[in-house]
Image (cartoon, grey):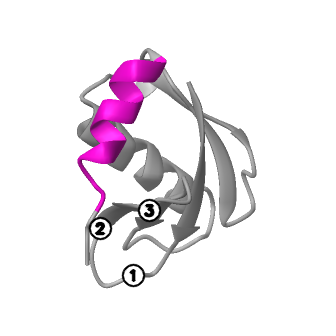
């Protein structure tokens, strides 16, 4: 499944937030230089979705804060995990 991710590098902590508009926001502590933030994002998503890093692929937006990421899981499994992140206020 392909999901849109908005990445905020240089954050104080690593955090994933999914909102009802369908956007996954990733706060990561790495700086956006020499691909470090992309590597960090892949590690964070791999741990969250419980898949090997090779199953996470940035397919669009390598140098942008807005990325399209392919997750090597079925659509239902990805959506189930994303719903766990929704915070009702």
Specify the label residue 11 is tagged with: 1
In screen coordinates, is 37 left or right of 49? right
Instruction: Note whether 7 is above or below 52 in the view shown.
Output: below
Residue 50 x, y percent position in the rendering? 24, 28
Which residue is more in the foreground, 1 or 64? 1
Please provide the residue range marked out in magenta.
75-86
- Mark in the foreground, 2 or 3: 3
Provide the secondary structure element on which disc 3 rests. Answer: loop
Q: Nearer the viewer, residue 74 or 45?
A: 74
- Foreground disc of the pair 3, 1: 3
Circle 1 packing at 10 Å, graded few (<14), some (14-19), many (20+), is some
In-image side of 7 versus 47 (left or right): right
Q: Which mark is residue 19?
A: 3
Q: Mark 2 points at which residue?
A: 14
Could you tell me which residue is drawn at 25 percent across and 39 percent down?
Answer: 47
Question: Where on the picture, by quarter, is residue 40?
Answer: bottom left
Establish if 27 lies above or below 78: below
Disc 2 from disc 3: Cα separation: 17 Å
- Residue shown at 74% from the left, 63% from the top: 64
Q: Which residue is drawn at 69% across and 61% down?
A: 66
The residue closer to the viewer here, 72 or 22, is 22
Which circle's residue, 3 or 1, is located before the other in the chain?
1
Closest to the observer: 24 or 26?
24
């Amino acid at each position: 499944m392909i999901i849109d991710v908005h990445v905020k590098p240089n954050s104080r902590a690593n955090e994933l937030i999914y909102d009802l508009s369908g956007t996954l926001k990733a706060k990561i502590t790495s700086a956006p230089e020499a691909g470090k933030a992309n590597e960090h994002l892949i590690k964070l998503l791999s741990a969250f979705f419980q898949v090997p890093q090779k199953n996470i692929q940035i397919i669009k937006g390598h140098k942008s804060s807005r990325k399209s990421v392919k997750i090597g899981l079925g659509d239902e499994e990805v959506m189930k995990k994303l719903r766990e992140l929704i915070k009702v206020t």
